[in-house]
Image: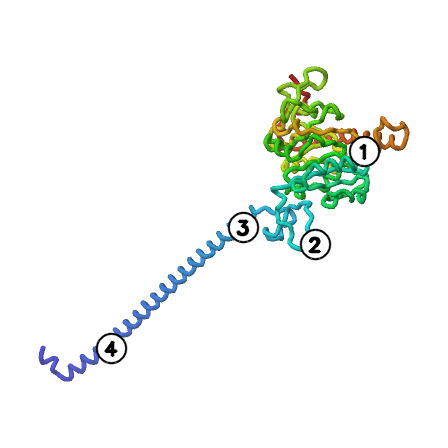
Amino acid sequence: MGSLFTDPATKRRCFCNLIPAAALLCIVFFMGSAFVTTDYKEKVSTWGATNSVQTSQTNSKTILNTQTTQSNLCKSQRKPTGSEPLPKGIISQTSNFEMQPLWGSPKGKGKTKSSKSLLAIPVGVMQKKAVNQIVKKFPPSDFMVVLFHYDGVVDEWRDLQWSDSALHISAINQTKWWFAKRFLHPDIVAEYNYIFLWDEDLQVENFHPLRYLSLIKREGLEISQPALDTSKSEIHHRITARSRKGDVHRRIYKFTGGGRCYENSTAPPCTGWVEMMAPVFSRAAWRCAWHMIQNDLIHAWGLDMKLGYCAQGDRSKNVGVVDSEYIVHMGIPTLGGFDEKKVHPGSHTFNERLAVRKRSYVELEIFRNRWQMAVTEDKCWIDPYPESSKNSSH
């Protein structure tokens, strides 16, 4: 063995044989390294791409969830019809009749909401004295006054002390309900606590508005009227007559004759009813009542029998007549002329007044038919007073 490796020729042959083997090993090593490196890079690249995709997907989901939440929030954000293009904070949905100065600072926003009510009266200049007495009873710090001039005469009211602070609206030969439908929209009068929609032929010697407001708030009356002085007033319905037993009454009892009223009577005019000459509405009750006023039925006959639906609850509790603050109803016909009993039959004035009365009865029948049709067509509406269409019974 020793002599074999010491031979120079043998050594050269061994060395020459090792060179190809070493070269082969180097090639294999480098090729393997290349494969390992490439595989590693591919794995790293794949992991990075996967991680990037996962991160992107997570971010997309977060953005989508945020957008969905915002979209749902926006859908639930109800805006008044027509105001959708506007940012919510700039929308001013309600208004009032408060006059603003031409210079200086404007009156504070919402100032009337907690402090004022509204007195609205249809007026003709011939009843100027009576109207003056009514308005003077209502403190200007607590009431805004609106006059509806049905005779077109406005300038002759300028001499009254309060005239310039009142709002004057003129339209020839239109009724209280015509004016109310057009100028007392719920969004316009939304800042007033109560709406007094009164006739002009009333005497208010025994009436005090602030005491009246205190009483109806205490009693929870959403729709009310002051009682009528029985010794001086023209009484059309017994429920409006003043009772001397307390501050308020909500029903009457009638045991004989037609239209009987008992303890269990639930329909007008036994309970849940006021007359139309001096009604007082809460803000919520007026919003409902305004929608019931028909645009073309300007005398509003029949409306009184349905006002209880706007009482914000049980009409036998939330509608009442205030006895301790009472008025006189003089019953003076104005639209269409004077009392037909005091003018000659066949005269122009008599014929006009007769035509007004005829139109009123026609409107009553139209309103009744419209109500019945609406009840029949609205399959989702449930009548809270299912016995209201029947006569009061024992």
Q: Name the residue under label 4.
A: 20
Residue ID at (32%, 70%)? 34
Left/right placement of residue 363 relative to residue 219 reads right
Say whether marks 4 and 3 touch (CB < 8 Å).
no
- Identify the colour scheme used: rainbow
Work out how far the residue at label 1 is from the one at label 2, CA to CA, in angstroms. 37 Å
Which is nearer the N-term, disc 2 or disc 4?
A: 4
Q: Name the residue under label 3.
A: 71
Q: Mark 1 points at which residue?
A: 334
Decide: is 105 above or below 180: below
Which is nearer the N-term, disc 1 or disc 4?
A: 4
Which is nearer the N-term, disc 4 or disc 3?
A: 4
Decide: is 320 above or below 87: above
Judged from the image, the secondary structure of the residue bearing numbered disc 3 is helix
Say whether marks 1 and 3 touch (CB < 8 Å).
no
Which is nearer the N-term, disc 1 or disc 2?
A: 2
Q: Which amino acid does label 3 sit on?
A: Ser
Q: What residue type is labelled 4?
A: Pro
Question: Badge 4, how many Cα within 10 Å: few under 14, some, many 20+?
Answer: few
Residue 368 visible, this orientation: no
Work out how far the residue at label 4 is from the one at label 3, CA to CA, in angstroms. 74 Å
Question: Badge 2, how many Cα within 10 Å: few under 14, some, many 20+?
Answer: few
